[in-house]
Image (tube, rainbow, N blue to C red):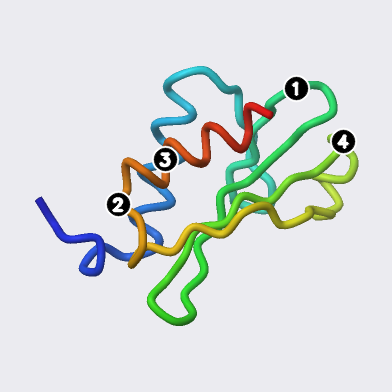
């Protein structure tokens, strides 16, 4: 198993997106990036932040129109040096399920 510090942010984002997409959410591409539909009024994207040691953030939009216009609000930030990938995935699921 590869240590979290050795995995790229892009790899972690793609892995989390793949799990989300396979399990229960419908997605569409928005400027080449996966945008997930949690409900009629809740769209979100998983974004990797390259600064410091790296982090994952969930970005939320209140409508499809906002999502298509790239109007997202940042959610919680999950630092890869503080959490393992499974914990980040579980925290993301909890955040989008609210």
For the residues marked 4 and 1, what is the alpha-carbon distance in whole angstroms? 9 Å
Label 2 element class: loop
Label 1: state its secondary structure. Answer: strand
Q: Looking at the rendering, which quadrant does residue 66 occupy?
A: top right
Residue 89 is labelled as 3
Which is more N-terminal, label 4 or label 3?
Answer: 4
Q: Mark 2 or mark 1: name the one nearer the start of the chain.
A: 1
x, y percent for residue 6: 21, 68
Residue at image mark 4? 63
Q: CA distance from mark 2 to mark 4?
A: 31 Å
Q: Which residue is mark 2?
A: 84
Depth check, mark 3 against mark 4: the one in front is: 3
Rounded to the nearest angstrom, the CA distance separating label 2 from label 1 is 28 Å
Residue 26 x %, y %: 60, 23
- Residue at image point 44% right, 64% down: 79
Task: Give the answer, above or below, for where 63 lies relative to 26.
Answer: below
What residue is shown at x 36% (from left), y 63% (from top)? Answer: 82
Left or right position of 37 against 63 = left
């Amino acid at each position: 198993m590869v240590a979290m510090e050795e995995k790229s942010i892009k790899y972690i984002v793609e892995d989390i997106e793949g799990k989300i997409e396979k399990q229960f959410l419908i997605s569409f591409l928005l400027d080449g990036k996966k945008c997930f539909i949690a409900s009629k009024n809740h769209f979100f994207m998983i974004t990797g932040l390259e600064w410091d040691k790296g982090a994952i953030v969930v970005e939320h939009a209140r409508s499809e129109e906002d999502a298509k216009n790239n109007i997202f609000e940042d959610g919680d930030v999950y630092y890869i040096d503080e959490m393992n990938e499974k914990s980040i995935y579980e925290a993301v699921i909890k955040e989008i399920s609210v």
